[in-house]
Image: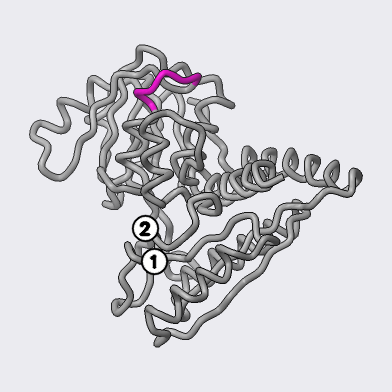
Amino acid sequence: MILLDGKKTSADIKEEIALEVAELKRNEQKVPHLAAIIVGNNGASVTYVNAKVKACERVGFESTLIRLPENISEEDLLNEIEVLNVDNDIDGFIVQLPLPDHIDEQKVLMAVDPDKDVDGFHPTNVGKMALNLPTFISATPFGILELLERYNIETSGKNVVVIGRSHIVGSPMSILLSQKRKVGNATVTLTHSRTKNLSQITREADIIIAALGIPEFLKADMVKQDAVIIDVGITRLADASKKSGYRLVGDVAFNEVAEKASHITPVPGGVGPMTIAMLLKNTLLANKRRA
């Protein structure tokens, strides 16, 4: 069994990006500038955004963090987005999700300039992705593609099963892996909560991408020998034996599935670290396009 080490792979990608940024500086060219808007004080969101800011510093990007109050009106948030849309110094920006209940998330995502949408959530970019046109691929699917490529995992002609149909991971992964691309050309089955005989379907899979948000859902008896397992889920489970009082688990029952898998991502340290690395890669791409 080979562990797909997202922590090491993301560090490698950041190092590659840092070298490109250093070259831009040597040539007195504009370095990438990533901005982030965060509304309120959601603990997980604050942690994630702070990690993005640190990652920008590490690779030599400029970064701007805009903190807005929980009770900001939708109109005022949309105005903040428009300021970033027209700011020529900003190459790309993200609006950290989730947003407070009184704000229409879809309206906010639609307001972001597609050319600065480094999260890849705008319908224009989702449409380009579906048509296999150059665009920003959202960070988690982009990170999974990168892991598969860097570990030389063959996808062409393989039977891939995606569990979960979210717009952020499941649906785009099913499209990307079926496309004619280097990491693609697979036969993909997209499954979800209404799928019948799911275990029978997963047992036929050469590659399984679990992204449904149910801790330790995928068991060993649902997996064939030497399958490749990509675990996108992450959930906190209470654990009195841990100093923190909890442990992090994915959508895969790691210990039992790892015994059958040829390759598997750990949780934490698998897909998670890849998301920030790919957000940086998208921002570098935005900078190159604007240049």
217 lies left or right of 200? right
> Mark 1 belongs to which amino acid?
Val
54 lies left or right of 2? right
The answer to whether the residue labelled 2 contacts the one labelled 1, judged by CB atoms less than 8 Å apart, is: no
- Residue 237 higher or lower than 2, as above or below: below
| Residue 181 highlighted magenta (yes or no) | yes
- Residue 70 higher or lower than 33, as above or below: below
Nearer to the camera, 123 or 274:
123
114 lies left or right of 36? left
Nearer to the camera, 28 or 69:
28
| Residue 95 highlighted magenta (yes or no) | no
Mark 2 or mark 1: which is in front? 1
**Residue marked by disc 1:** 108
- For the C terminus, the image quarter is top right
- Residue 91 higher or lower than 86, as above or below: above
Q: Earlier in the sequence, mark 2 or mark 1?
A: 1
Measuring 31% from the left and 70% from the top, which residue is drawn there? 104
125 lies left or right of 274? left
Q: Based on the displayed image, in which of its 4 quarters is residue 61 positioned? A: bottom right
Range drawn in magenta: 177-182
**Residue marked by disc 2:** 235
Q: Based on the displayed image, in which of its 4 quarters is residue 226 positioned? A: top left
Q: In whole angstroms, how far apart are the C-alphas of marks 2 and 1?
A: 27 Å
Nearer to the camera, 155 or 27:
27
**Residue found at the very far top of the displayed protein:** 157
> Mark 2 belongs to which amino acid?
Thr
Measuring 29% from the left and 77% from the top, which residue is drawn there? 101
**Residue found at the very far front of the displayed protein:** 86
Measuring 38% from the left and 62% from the top, which residue is drawn there? 236
Q: Position of residue 55 (x, y in %)?
A: 67, 56
